[in-house]
Amino acid sequence: MRLALAAVALALGSRIACGESPPSADDPQVRARAQTIWRERCATCHGLDGDGDGPQGRYLEVKPRRLSDRAWQATVDDQRLRTVIVEGGPAVGLHVGMAPNPDLRDQPAVVEALVRHIRRL
């Protein structure tokens, strides 16, 4: 799976290097990369459907956020979600168990696709 992620990242980077506009969150390659990241990194704690019931979540001191909770979603803006995804929980006063994803710092379209995924939960 890491090889597939690397190939997608390389393809996206090559497009920019060739003078094409940066990819958007609507780009199929970007959406595919975001879905892979969701399954491999996020769903392990938050669950595939964002219900906070991922297989690793049960071992955490602080249980993962139920991202599918509409009441919670109404209280959080997209910028906060972006910050948490890239910088981790402590960046916004949340638990250290919400790990950062610094490799996504230079991939705003992927981060945006992840935010859109969370909003659809």
Image (cartoon, rainbow, N blue to C red):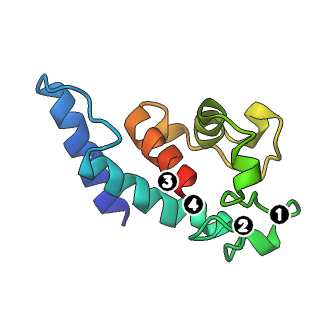
Is residue 10 visible to us here? yes
- Residue 79 as seen in the image, left or right of residue 110: right
Q: Amino acid at mark 4?
A: Leu
* Residue named by callout 3: 117
Q: Amino acid at mark 3?
A: His
Is residue 107 visible to us here? no
Please tell me how crowded label 3 is: few (under 14), some (14-19), or many (20+) other residues with Cα within 10 Å. Answer: some
Q: Position of residue 6 (x, y in %)?
A: 31, 52
Q: Secondary structure at mark 1?
A: loop
Between label 1 and label 4, give the one nearer the viewer.
4
Q: Position of residue 95 (x, y in %)?
A: 83, 47
Q: Amino acid at mark 1?
A: Lys
Which tag, 4 or 2, sits closer to the chain's start?
A: 2
Label 3 close to label 4 by CB (< 8 Å): yes
Please tell me how crowded label 2 is: few (under 14), some (14-19), or many (20+) other residues with Cα within 10 Å. Answer: many
- Residue 75 as seen in the image, left or right of residue 106: right
Label 3 close to label 2 by CB (< 8 Å): no
* Residue named by callout 1: 63
Q: Distance from label 1 to label 2 (Cα)?
A: 7 Å
The correct choice, above or below, for 7 with respect to 51 in the image is above
* Residue named by callout 2: 52
Q: Nearer the viewer, residue 37 or 69?
A: 69
The correct choice, above or below, for 103 with respect to 43 in the image is above
Please tell me how crowded label 4 is: few (under 14), some (14-19), or many (20+) other residues with Cα within 10 Å. Answer: some
Q: Position of residue 88 (x, y in %)?
A: 68, 41
* Residue named by callout 4: 121
| Residue positioned 42% across, 30% down in the render | 106
Identity of the residue furthest to the bottom in this view:
55
Which tag, 1 or 3, sits closer to the chain's start?
A: 1
Label 1 close to label 2 by CB (< 8 Å): yes
Quarter placement of the N terminus:
bottom left
